[in-house]
Each structure stands twice: as C-alpha cells, then as structure tokens.
Amino acid sequence: MDDKHENLTFFGRIRKFLKVNIIAGLLFLTPIAATFFLLRLTIGWLDQILLIIPAKFRPENFLPFPVPGLGLIVLIVVLIFSGVFVRNYLGNKLVSIWERIIDYIPIVNKIYTAVKQLIDTIARGTAKDFKRVVLIEYPKENIYAMAYVTGVSVGELQEKTKRKMINVYVPTTPNPTSGFYLMVPEDETIPLDMSVEDSFKLLMSGGIITPERKNNKGGNK
C-alpha cells in the first residue's frame, strides 16, 4: 500500500513538474516566436512595396543577394516625400480636394475618417489633452465605462446641478477618437492609476492588452 502511494506521489510530482515547466516555457517562448513571426510577416509585406518600382530598376538586379527590409527604407523615403508634398501650398490644396471627393463616397468616407482620426491621435499626441482616466457607471448601474476627464464644468452647467460636475469624454472601441461627452458628479467617478497612453492600448485592443497596475499612488494628475 505504501509502495502504491509512493508511486502515485512520484508520478504526481512528475506530472506537476512537466505541467509547470511546459507552461513556463510557453509563456517565455510564445511571445518571442510571435514577435519574430509578426516582424518577418511585416518585413515581407513591406518588401512588396518594391513591386511598385519598374522591374529593371529593382534592387535585386544590382545587389548580389536579397536584403530583407528594403521595403521599409522605400516606405520611409515615400513618407518623407509625401510629407514634404502635403505641407506645401499646392499639396495642401490637392489634399483638400481629395478629402472633399472622399466625403461623397458612402462607406469609404466613414473608413477614411476613422483611420485618419486614429492616426492623428497617435501621431500628434491628442491623448495629452485628457487630464486623467476614470471609471463611471454607464450605461446603467454596476456596468462601468472608462472615461477621460477633460475639465471641470463651469458657469450655468455647474450652478443648475448644485453638485461639483466634471466633463468627461467616453471613447469607443477600437477607435478612441470617436465617442461622446458627458457631465458627471466628480464624487461618483472612480479614479484610475493607469496612464492615458496605457488606456488607449486597452481601448484599441478591445480589452486584450491590459496594462499592469502601477504601484504609485499619484496616478495621473
């Protein structure tokens, strides 16, 4: 009986050892493998940009071996020239005409506007306009939405409510640049310690990317 119990204990330890270490290995290697896979996929996709160059002028005709990532260099050069173009008077006018044309195309105009707003938020740092991140009970009790404090309500808006109200912006997922404005009592909000940048990652990923909680009690002020 004791031998049987010892065998069960031994095999239990082996099973636990294998389980713990396999999981630890997965947690360590999976992000590394996924990162390399995505990088390889992205570089391969960017290298397809070289196809816009006439065949006889492509780099492989002049280099002794293929160089991965040349598409990224071409993309950077194209972005620089595009930026120079759209920032001058003629380019700015042409962009305005282009956007007016897009506005008249159903569905396409919605996609174009959403992507443009998202890129503008990331590139220009629009998120800095938000002071701090809070939770509010919305759209009903015991259901919470993340919101950004944009300021304190003043004037008639504050006087009519008889309570200290704050202005909040409630974003939508996956495009935080679309959302709506609410006024809520400050004492009914729950302050969060996460930064505005981390909250944007959470929103744009639909909750998949959850930032780790910071130990500092100061939060965002």
Image (cartoon, rainbow, N blue to C red):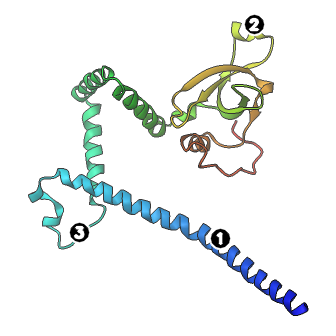
Vertical arrangement, residue 137 with respect to residue 48, above or below: above
Disc 1 residue type (three-letter): Ile
Q: Residue at x 21, y 72 (%)?
A: 65
Asked which secondary structure carries label 1, the reply is helix
Please tell me whether mark 2 or mark 1 is closer to you in this view.
1
Asked which secondary structure carries label 3, the reply is loop
Q: Is residue 30 left or right of residue 215?
A: left
Q: Position of residue 187 (x, y in %)?
A: 81, 25
Task: State which quadrant residue 19 falls in.
Answer: bottom right
Quick one: 130 or 210, which is closer to the camera? 210
Q: Is residue 129 left or right of residue 34?
A: right
- Earlier-in-chain disc, 3 versus 2: 3
The image quadrant where one finds the N terminus is bottom right
- Earlier-in-chain disc, 3 versus 1: 1
Disc 2 residue type (three-letter): Lys
Label of residue 23 in the image: 1
Q: Position of residue 72 (x, y in %)?
A: 31, 55
Q: Residue at x 51, y 30 (%)?
A: 177
Label of residue 66 in the image: 3
* Residue 175 makes an appearance in the image: yes
Furthest-left residue in view? 56
